[in-house]
Image (cartoon, rainbow, N blue to C red):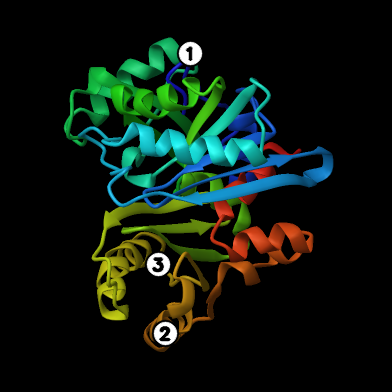
Amino acid sequence: MSSAATISTRFYELGLVRRIERWLNAMPHPSCVVEIAANRVSAARWGKGGHLESFATEELPAGAVMPSPVDANIPQPEALKSALRRVFGRVPHHGGLLALLIPDPVVRLFILPFETLPRSAEEARPLLRWRLKKSIPFDVEETVISWMRQKGRDGKLEVMAAVARQRIVREYEQVIESLGASIGIVLSSTLASLPLLEERGATLLVRRSAKTLTTVIVRGANLCVYRSSEMSADLTPHAMLEEIFPAIVYYQDTWGESVDRVWLAGLGARDEIFRRALSDELKVPVAALPGAPEVSRLGSEVKDLVDQNLDALVGWTLNVGL
């Protein structure tokens, strides 16, 4: 998603990861990527072949960034700029293009059934905005929107539409631009992380960033479920289960099967407590995302980033196939 331009793609018959790669490769795909979360900022620079050249992360003071799809997100811009300056001191952007990953709550993602959708972006965009009009908590004409196509369970067309309020996206872009860099693409963090998931069977990703819990179910080439919610700071296994159960039930009702595995991200030292709770309840393998096959194939320095809950930075380099 970018406020400069939006894009659709014809590659809905490809696998999910490949479609995301094509989606993003149709836009600029900078080797330097920055993630702004509610509690920290991080950046990485990637070389050829997915080589990690440098990375850095800096904590943010409480309240510096307050993710919301509707309201102002950056009440303390100077605190955010200060942290970014320190990050850029170790991961220089050289005044070039950056990929910017923003908090999940800013970007709403919908999976919409369509009989048909025009190939032309100029014709498709008004139809998508009309379909989304009653589903988003702000004027649909104020949005930036990007989309991809996929085949649903019955073989019919589905459209994955990512929508954000333009002025909120611009808040993040303007902070970056004030530090001498330019934005090539804007994407939500979890969407950037999806290439770390298998396309074999059905995979549930439960990803936490600050107070946001994002639940994703991917089945083969399909993104089946995507929801993001703000949770209590002292998240409990019971609260997590209550949050993810609607996604699991929807998937079971729609596809007639259960998920095959669960990957957890962003839970820190309490990861094992959540892992046991979900494993006991769902009766499927549950593990931390660093153990995923796609992550295991990466070099040790890159796997270390996933261990530090910087999976979105890693997913970005797999997205663009550097």
Query: In front: mark 2 or mark 1?
Result: 2
Q: Nearer the viewer, residue 259 or 263?
A: 263
Contact, CB < 8 Å: mark 2 with mark 1?
no
Give the CA separation, mark 1 to mark 3. 34 Å
User: Is disc 1 surrounded by few (<14), some (14 to 19) or many (20+) residues within 10 Å?
Assistant: few
Residue 182's spot in the image, x, y percent?
56, 20
Residue 17's spot in the image, x, y percent?
62, 46
Give the residue at mark 1: 120
* Earlier-in-chain disc, 2 versus 1: 1
The amino acid beneath tag 3 is: Gly
* Earlier-in-chain disc, 1 versus 3: 1
Decide: is 145 above or below 70.
above
The amino acid beneath tag 2 is: Ile
Decide: is 129 above or below 44.
above
The amino acid beneath tag 1 is: Ser
Decide: is 165 above or below 201.
above
Quadrant where the image shows the C terminus: top right
Residue 297's spot in the image, x, y percent?
77, 62
Regarding residue 261, the answer to whether it shows in the image is: yes
Residue 168, by quadrant, is top left
Residue 55's spot in the image, x, y percent?
66, 47
Query: In front: mark 2 or mark 3?
Result: 2
Give the residue at mark 2: 273
